[in-house]
């Protein structure tokens, strides 16, 4: 999975606003992809009977 430059920049802005830290492009890309994968896993989780 590869994110657009705009998506990475947006993630960096949100991260800085929420946590006060500045991320490198590489760190932002990795963290954003991990977050997206987490949401995918939660979305596709089987419903309990």
Image (cartoon, grey):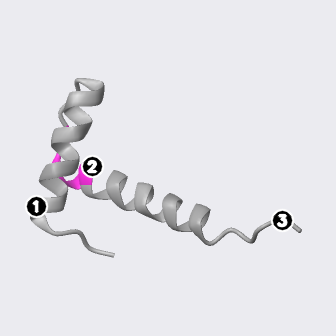
Looking at the magenta stretch, what is its main secondary structure? Answer: helix
Note whether 20 is above or below 36 in the view shown: above
- Residue under the point 89% across and 68% down: 49
Between discs 3 and 1, the one toward the N terminus? 1
Give the left or right position of residue 28, taking residue 34 as reference. Answer: left
Look at mark 3 in the image and give the residue it sits on: 48
Between discs 2 and 1, the one toward the N terminus? 1
Look at mark 2 in the image and give the residue it sits on: 27
Residue 16: where, in percent of width, then height? 20, 32
Give the left or right position of residue 38, taking residue 36 as reference. Answer: right
- CA distance for labels 3 and 2: 35 Å
> Could you tell me which secondary element the residue under label 2 belongs to?
helix
- CA distance for labels 3 and 1: 38 Å
Residue contact at pointers 3 and 1, CB within 8 angstroms:
no
Q: Residue furthest front?
A: 49
Q: Which mark is residue 34?
A: none
Note whether 2 is above or below 35 in the view shown: below
Quarter occupied by the N terminus = bottom left
Residue 42: where, in percent of width, then height? 60, 61
Residue 10: where, in percent of width, then height? 16, 50
Q: Which region of the structure is painted magenta? A: 23-28
Q: Which mark is residue 6?
A: 1
- CA distance for labels 2 and 1: 15 Å
> Could you tell me which secondary element the residue under label 1 belongs to?
helix
Note whether 24 is above or below 16 in the view shown: below
> Is the residue marked by circle 3 packed among few (<14), some (14-19), or many (20+) residues within 10 Å?
few
Residue contact at pointers 3 and 2, CB within 8 angstroms:
no
């Amino acid at each position: 999975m590869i994110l657009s430059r705009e998506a990475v920049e947006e993630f960096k802005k949100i991260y800085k606003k929420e946590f006060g830290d500045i991320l490198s492009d590489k760190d932002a890309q990795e963290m954003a992809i991990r977050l997206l994968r987490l949401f995918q896993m939660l979305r596709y989780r089987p419903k309990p009977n």
